[in-house]
Image: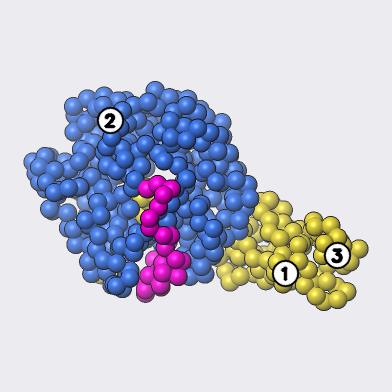
Chain colours: A yellow, B blue
Amino acid sequence: MTMQNWIRGMIKGMSFTTALFIFQCCYGMPQDMQDDLLLEGSVTSKTTGLPIEGIKVNVKETGQSQTTNSEGKFSLYAPWMESMTLQFQDVDGNENGFYADSDTVLTDLIPDSEPLTVDITLEEK
Amino acid sequence: MPSPLSKLAFRQFKKAETRIHELRYLFWECTARCNLHCLHCGSDCSIDHTQPDMPLQDFLSALDTIRKPAGDLIVAITGGEPLLRQDLEICGREIRKRGIRWGIVTNGHLYNREKHNTLLNAGMGALTISLDGLQESHDWLRNTPGSFVRVDRAIGLAASSARLNFDVVTCVNNRNIRELPDIYDYLVSKEVKAWRLFTIVPIGRAVNHPELFLSDLEFKSMLDFITDRRNKGCLDIQFSCEGYVGEYESKVRNTPFFCRAGINVGSVLINGSISACPNIDRSFVQGNIYKDNFYDVWQSAFIPFRDRSWTRTGTCASCKDYKDCQGNGFHNWHGDKSQVLVCHNAKLEHA
């Protein structure tokens, strides 16, 4: 460890607390130290196995949502929590077929880990 | 008042930080376009832009030169107005793919519920919105009727997110200084958690508007206001890190003054220039991503930022606080650099 790193570590550890190391530039925004995780996956039909476009994927706890694309895929960052509920809802009427809504509870989540893949099949109504 | 020992320790800390100069905060001036025409704009950008937006890939090529990014490195996407970029979410996702966090500084005009959702989905973790007063004074400074209504919507959305590290910034001027208590109450009612107050530096478009600048007495009253409200604890209110404020240092901020421009803060500007904060005089540019390796420049250039002894000139030459101030915020050096543009500490002494 260099002398500079040693001094830095000492000061960080004792007299000023880690608050010194969290800074924001005067014309910038705050730093981001919060844990989150990337949820990725796809939605397919239980009957045909084909991807379903237009399914709303909703993080129940935060209200964040995304609609699956033409490949049935979604990808979103969500704040980390130990468990969360993903809601899959057919919100586009008859446009891409009628599917029953489904909820999936994710548990034992690890912050800032590799993307978490959530592949779901939905039953046709 | 900090003890002499803690002042000494902090000076040593600054020396160590300067020697290590770890890049922890990178501005990306992604566009020169703006949808407002604020009276105080430091970059004097306008909607009639001549400079095209920087292609994402150009910025990523610069970012990818960073050999081992600091664990807390964050990219601050700024402009112009970053929300004018249609590919902002793609930009954010590409930055996150590299394990780097990102956020934006915005006027909030285009920040609606859908944008809030898509930016969060793309991994945005930090956000600053500018609010320059209640309706009349905000619309006046932003030079756009109806802009307060838009920013009010943006603040409400941002404050509702537990994920975002969000704050509001206010440029305090001669018109809105008497509104500060009302703005404070407004922000508390909106459940905003953090508020930073700036003053306006006479650069860019602001030079033509003397009513934007605070008198010495008004500046002191602003710091007194911050001190008073910090004691109430409803909101994390701070004076920005724009300058050294002497005996107010421990009263108006969470940490003592330390201008980290070029020490921990770098930037890629709209034309590819490599510098520190975007509001710093462009004569301090250290290189250009279109001809230099960004990280090599960061590691080996930036001498005027890391050795500020050249600022010991003009009124700084004989200043008793120089060791703690070191020439004030770097953005206060313009022109021939023979005199600091604003000395906040002197304003307090004259008040």
Assess whether mark 3 and mark 2 are in contact (beta carbons under 8 angstroms): no
SS of the residue at dot 3? loop
Q: Indicate the secondary structure of the residue bearing disc 2.
A: helix
Q: Are marks 1 and 3 on the same chain?
A: yes
Give the quarter of the figure containing the C terminus of chain B: top left
Q: Which residue is mark 3?
A: A97
Q: Residues within 10 Å of mark 2 (few under 14, many from 20)?
A: few
Coordinates of residue B347 in the picture (x, y in percent)? 21, 31
- Left or right: B304, with A46 as reference point: left
Residue pointed to by mark 2: B210
> Is label 1 on the same chain as label 2?
no
Asked whether residue B59 is drawn in magenta, I would say yes
Start-end of magenta stretch: B45-71
Q: Which chain is indicated by disc 3?
A: A
Write down the residue under mark 1. A70
User: Tag 1's secondary structure?
Assistant: loop
Residue type, mark 2 in image = Pro
Identify the mark nearer the N-term, 1 or 3: 1
Res. B193 in view: yes
Residue drawn at x 61%, y 65% is A38
Tell me the residue at 24%/51% (across/down).
B281
Q: Is residue B63 above or below residue B240?
A: below
Judged left or right of residue B94, residue B68 is left
**In the picture shown, does residue B198 fall above or below B271?**
above
Q: CA distance from mark 1 to mark 2?
A: 55 Å
Magenta stretch, main secondary structure, is loop
